[in-house]
Image (spheres, rainbow, N blue to C red):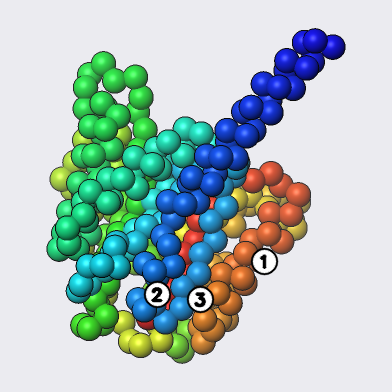
Amino acid sequence: DNSLRKLDASHKLVIESVNYASRLQRGQLPRQERIEQRFSSFATIWEPRDTIGGDLYWLSSSQQSGPFVLAVADCTGHGVPGAMLSLLVSNSLERIYANDTAEDPATALMSLDHYVRTGLNQDRADSESDDGCDAAVLRIDRDKQTIEFAGAKLGLFQVDTKGGVTRHQGARCSLGYQDAIEDKDKPVVKTIRYQAGDAFAIVTDGLTDQIGGTGAVKVSYGYKRIEAILKANCSQNAQTIADAVRSDYAAWQGTESRRDDVTAVFFRL
């Protein structure tokens, strides 16, 4: 009985600590004042596989004038390790865009690559870790109706008001790991022009790689289902699109266990 009480007390302490960490992690996500006045509509799905996780979305300060920056990152792992890495990524983004949003998205991703690698001492031969993240950075200029986009394994969906969907893909590299990114694999900036009313989506692979379905052979959720939902809801606001994806994804997952953290950001300009 004494051993069980000690075990129960230890378990309670761990749960309380993780729950408190969850509140801290949610508190790092963009506050409403960073969202207001910037989007026609904005909605997210942010569901760590465990109580805390390694996915995040980030917005530059609303105190800065001119174009603003939206970023999404998927850090190695989930749970406590992923959450610790997401803190480093979030702080690095704040550092990159501390004074202004002048740095273009590709340069910002390479800065993030540097900060994660050096922050974890993975630039040293005796490093004990080899972790990093996938990320997408968007620099949005509403006056010019342009988005400068760069991604590291994360892409961007764009859907017009007639239902036409374009998928802008990121570079085939990840950030922060021990091996430096070769020049040929480095992210590049793509300038995207949009019309008022266009909708956009960024999703992490926790959504697209989830196994499920109703057939005998279980397969991943994939990108085509997201495209179909975006087409079907091309005239709807971001929250309606997010609700449709969440509902379809839950039905797809069914009784299968969640494999990874899931983040999806939807917005209309």
In this rendering, the answer to whether 210 lies above or below 231 is: above
Q: Which mark is drawn over residue 114?
A: none
Left or right of 212 in this view: 179 = left
In this rendering, the answer to whether 167 lies above or below 212 is: below
Q: CA distance from mark 3 to mark 2?
A: 14 Å
Residue drawn where x is 35% and y is 24% of the image: 129
Q: Quadrant of the N terminus?
A: top right
Identify the secondary structure beneath mark 1: helix
Q: CA distance from mark 1 to mark 3?
A: 14 Å
Classify 10 Å Cα crowding around label 1: few (below 14), some (14-19), many (20 and above).
few
> Circle 3 is placed at which residue position?
238
Left or right of 23 in this view: 105 = left
Q: Amino acid at mark 1?
A: Ser
**Position of residue 49 measured from the top left corner of the image (x, y, whole percent):** 59, 44
Identify the secondary structure beneath mark 2: loop
Q: Which mark is drawn over residue 36?
A: 2
In this rendering, the answer to whether 148 lies above or below 27 is: below
**Position of residue 103 measured from the top left corner of the image (x, y, whole percent):** 16, 59
Residue 117 visible in the displayed image = yes
Residue drawn where x is 48% and y is 45% of the image: 24
In front of the other: label 2 or label 1?
2
Q: Amino acid at mark 3?
A: Ala
Q: Nearer the viewer, residue 105 or 161?
A: 105
> Circle 1 is placed at which residue position?
247
* Nearest to N terminus: mark 2 or mark 1: 2
Q: Are marks 2 and 1 in contact (CB under 8 Å)?
A: no
Q: Are marks 1 and 3 in contact (CB under 8 Å)?
A: no
Classify 10 Å Cα crowding around label 3: few (below 14), some (14-19), many (20 and above).
many
**Position of residue 153 measured from the top left corner of the image (x, y, whole percent):** 36, 51
Residue drawn where x is 61% and y is 70% of the image: 243
Q: CA distance from mark 2 to mark 1?
A: 26 Å
